[in-house]
Structure formats: structure tokens, C-alpha cells
């Protein structure tokens, strides 16, 4: 099977989408202590290590934006979702470090 490329969304694009009322689901793949120290409002916490076991919590009928601290784990999570048949998945470029920066 060919590896599909995980698309990225910029902080600016995501902020614009959220302000315009998009119905994208936000999936935060950091650990619980990282999430508790700050996250994007409305994001669902599903740590990367348990994502393959919690795929039923990620809707297939909505755009999904995956978030982590710097963008590395979200790319891995994006790849997991693509491999399980999800199609409208993006990784937040630069992660929360960029969102808060």
C-alpha cells in the first residue's frame, strides 16, 4: 500500500476556520499532563500511544485536525488515521508551540 502524505494546516488557517464556524474535529495526541497544562478549546485528548485503540472516537465524516506540541506526533497520528481509511486529516504545522507563539 502506498504511503499517503499527511497534509498540514497552518495556525492561521486553523484559527480562521475555527472563527468561521468550521465543524472540524480537533484531536490532541499529547499526553494528559501536557493537555492539562493548556490546549485548544474543543480539542479531544487521545494520546498518540492509544490512538489505534480509540479510533471509534474519531469521526470519519468530518475534517480532522491533529495537534501535538511541535508537529511530530501529530504527523504520526495523521499517518495512523490515513492507514485506517480516514481521508480528511491534517496535522497542525508547528503544533501548540506555534499556536501559542
Image (cartoon, rainbow, N blue to C red):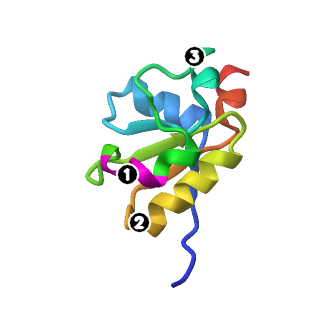
Q: Is residue 21 above or below residue 52?
A: above
Q: Is residue 83 above or below residue 1?
A: above
> Outermost residue, bottom direction?
1
Q: Read off the magenta span.
A: 52-56
Residue 36, horizontal then vertical, whole percent:
57, 16
For mark 2, give the secondary structure: loop
Q: Residue at x 68, y 43 (%)?
A: 71
Does the residue at mark 1 contact the one at mark 2 (Cβ under 8 Å)? yes
Which residue does the numbered mark 1 point to in the structure image?
55
Does the residue at mark 1 contact the one at mark 3 (Cβ under 8 Å)? no
Q: Local crowd at mark 1 within 10 Å, few (<14), some, or many (≥20)?
A: some
**Image quadrant assignment for residue 70:** top right
Horizontal side of 74 relative to 16 (left or right) equals right
Q: Which mark is residue 36?
A: 3
Does the residue at mark 2 contact the one at mark 3 (Cβ under 8 Å)? no
Q: Residue at x 55, y 21 (%)?
A: 39
Q: Earlier in the sequence, mark 1 or mark 3?
A: 3
Q: Is residue 22 magenta?
A: no
For mark 3, give the secondary structure: helix
Which residue does the numbered mark 2 point to in the structure image?
84
Q: Which mark is residue 89?
A: none
Q: CA distance from mark 1 to mark 2?
A: 9 Å
Residue 79, horizontal then vertical, whole percent:
55, 61
Amino acid at each position: 500500500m502506498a504511503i499517503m502524505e499527511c497534509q498540514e494546516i497552518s495556525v492561521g488557517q486553523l484559527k480562521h476556520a475555527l472563527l468561521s464556524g468550521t465543524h472540524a474535529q480537533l484531536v490532541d495526541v499529547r499526553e494528559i499532563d501536557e493537555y492539562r497544562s493548556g490546549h485548544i478549546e474543543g480539542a479531544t485528548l487521545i494520546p498518540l500511544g492509544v490512538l489505534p485503540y480509540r479510533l471509534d472516537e474519531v469521526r470519519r465524516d468530518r475534517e480532522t485536525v491533529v495537534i501535538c506540541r511541535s508537529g511530530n506526533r501529530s504527523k504520526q497520528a495523521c499517518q495512523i488515521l490515513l492507514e485506517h481509511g480516514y481521508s480528511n486529516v491534517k496535522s497542525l504545522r508547528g503544533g501548540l508551540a506555534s499556536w501559542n507563539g
